[in-house]
Image (tube, rainbow, N blue to C red):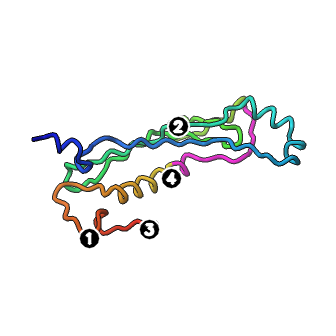
Amino acid sequence: DDSGDESDPEDSETPWICTLTIRRLRSHSPSSSLRHSSIAENHDSQPQSVCLKVATLSPTPHHPKVVGLLKVPFPLPDIEIESMAVRKRVVTAHGVSRTMSGAGEGHGGLVLTAEEIKDTISSTALWLVVREGFGGIGRERKRSEGGGWRMRA
């Protein structure tokens, strides 16, 4: 009877999709709306959110030592937070180079770099592996589901 095997989460190899979503929050303070009315008009024409697929994490329940496979596209882009712009990176013979912001205008504002995105992906994937109790074959279960690791509330 194989019907029970399909619903077992330990045997599932369905990948987790990691998506980075950044949303613009509007400021409701009257002083900022008076000072930045031209900026507010500019923000209305800009996108209000950025959604970007940054990784997949696939459990490997049938592997004796590997608990999961994390796939991250290369190169990851940088994201300008204030303008909600995704700046692609280009692979050259000298390494990875950053592209300029839209139309060459250097805002100098807050930028979420590819390295910061990669760090967030790695720590989130590790947290997910512990929370979900990923594990290979032949793994001995200890006191808790996470193989000795415990998640604090």
- From the image, state whether disc 2 or disc 3 is nearer to you: 3
Q: Nearer the viewer, mark 1 or mark 2?
A: 1
Q: Which residues are magenta?
A: 104-117
Q: Nearer the viewer, residue 153 or 139?
A: 153
Q: Please name the residue shown 68% across and 41% down the image.
A: 24
In terms of image quadrants, where is residue 150? bottom left
Looking at the rendered structure, the kind of residue marked 4 is Thr
Determine the image quadrant of residue 108: top right
**Taking 144 as reference, is 104 above or below it?**
above
**Gap in angstroms between the C-alphas marked 4 and 1:** 29 Å
Residue receiving disc 2: 52
Residue 35 appears left or right of 81? right
Residue at numbered disc 4? 120
* Other-residue count near label 1 (Cα within 10 Å), few / some / many at <14 / 14–19 / ≥20: few
Query: Around disc 4, counting alpha carbons within 10 Å, would you say few (fewer than 14), some (14 to 19), or many (20 or more)?
Result: few
Q: Name which of mark 2 and mark 3 comes first in the sequence.
A: 2
Foreground tag (3 vs 4): 3
The residue beneath circle 3 is: 152
